[in-house]
Every structure is written in C-alpha cells, then in structure tokens.
Image (cartoon, rainbow, N blue to C red):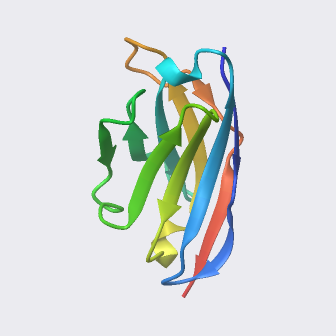
C-alpha cells in the first residue's frame, strides 16, 4: 500500500517555474514506478511524465518535453516535477501516481495539486 500527497502547486505567470513534490508512504516505495498526470477543466486526465523505480528511465509527454523534469529521491520517499517555461495550457490539477512492480496500471493516486498559469 502506498499513500501519496502532492504539494507545490500555485498561481504563476507564463514563463515562470514551479516544482511539484509528491510525498509517498510505504516501505516498498523504492520499487514502484512513479508518474505525474494532469487534468484540465473539461478535459480528460493526461499523462505528463514517468520515472522508473531506480530513476534510470524517464519519459515525457510531447507537450512538456524539454520544459519539465521528473526526478525521485528514494531515500526520502519523494518524487518531484520541475516545471519550467510554464504556459497557460499547463493549467490543470496535477496528480502523482504509483505503479507496482510488473504492473502496467497506476494503482495509487494522490489528491492532486492545482497549477494555474496566467498569460
């Protein structure tokens, strides 16, 4: 069982940066793949970034590639999403998610943190 809690969202202007944090509980956190997703008003939730249990493999949605960076600190049970050059279209609720080893679906989700980017 993994519990997740996001923080770090807020209201920023276009071009600004934000770093989202996800605190995870559970002894097996270091074995889980982690991901960030987002959901804008009136839209479906979409994938943003993922990172493997070791941090060696990362992937990003095309819309954020080159601007966002996902990272993790297994010693602290933390996952981060550094967001640079933010755009108004990045406005959404951002969710942290955990995927158990050998599973394809994300089983555990945080409550989300709001990111609003003004133009």
Residue at 39% x, 37% y: name it. Answer: 51
Q: Is residue 60 above or below residue 35?
A: below
Q: Is residue 28 above or below residue 106?
A: above
Is 16 or 109 nearer to us in this picture?
Answer: 16
Residue at 54% x, 88% y: name it. Answer: 119
Residue at 49% x, 25% y: name it. Answer: 106
Residue at 58% x, 68% y: name it. Answer: 18
Is 57 or 60 nearer to us in this picture?
Answer: 57
**Residue at the outermost front position:** 75
Left/right of residue 29 with respect to residue 85 in the rendered view: right
Return the x and y of residue 72 as percentages of the image width and height.
50, 41
Quadrant for residue 40, please give it.
Answer: bottom right
Is 16 or 87 nearer to us in this picture?
Answer: 16
Quadrant for residue 56, please give it.
Answer: top left
Left/right of residue 59 with respect to residue 82 in the rendered view: left
Left/right of residue 110 with respect to residue 71 in the rendered view: right
Q: Is residue 99 above or below residue 119?
A: above
Q: Does any portion of residue 62 appear in the rendered image?
A: yes
Q: Does any portion of residue 45 appear in the rendered image?
A: no
Return the x and y of residue 97 as percentages of the image width and height.
55, 34
């Amino acid at each position: 069982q993994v519990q997740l809690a996001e923080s770090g969202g807020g209201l920023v202007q276009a071009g600004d940066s934000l770093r989202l944090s996800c605190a995870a509980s559970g002894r097996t956190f270091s074995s889980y793949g982690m991901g960030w997703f987002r959901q804008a008003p009136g839209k479906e939730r979409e994938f943003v970034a993922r990172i493997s249990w070791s941090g060696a493999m990362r992937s990003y949605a095309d819309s954020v590639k080159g601007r966002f960076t996902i990272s993790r600190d297994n010693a602290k049970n933390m996952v981060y999403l550094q967001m640079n050059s933010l755009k108004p279209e990045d406005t959404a609720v951002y969710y942290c998610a955990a995927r158990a080893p050998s599973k394809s679906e994300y089983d555990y989700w945080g409550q989300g943190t709001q990111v609003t980017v003004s133009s």
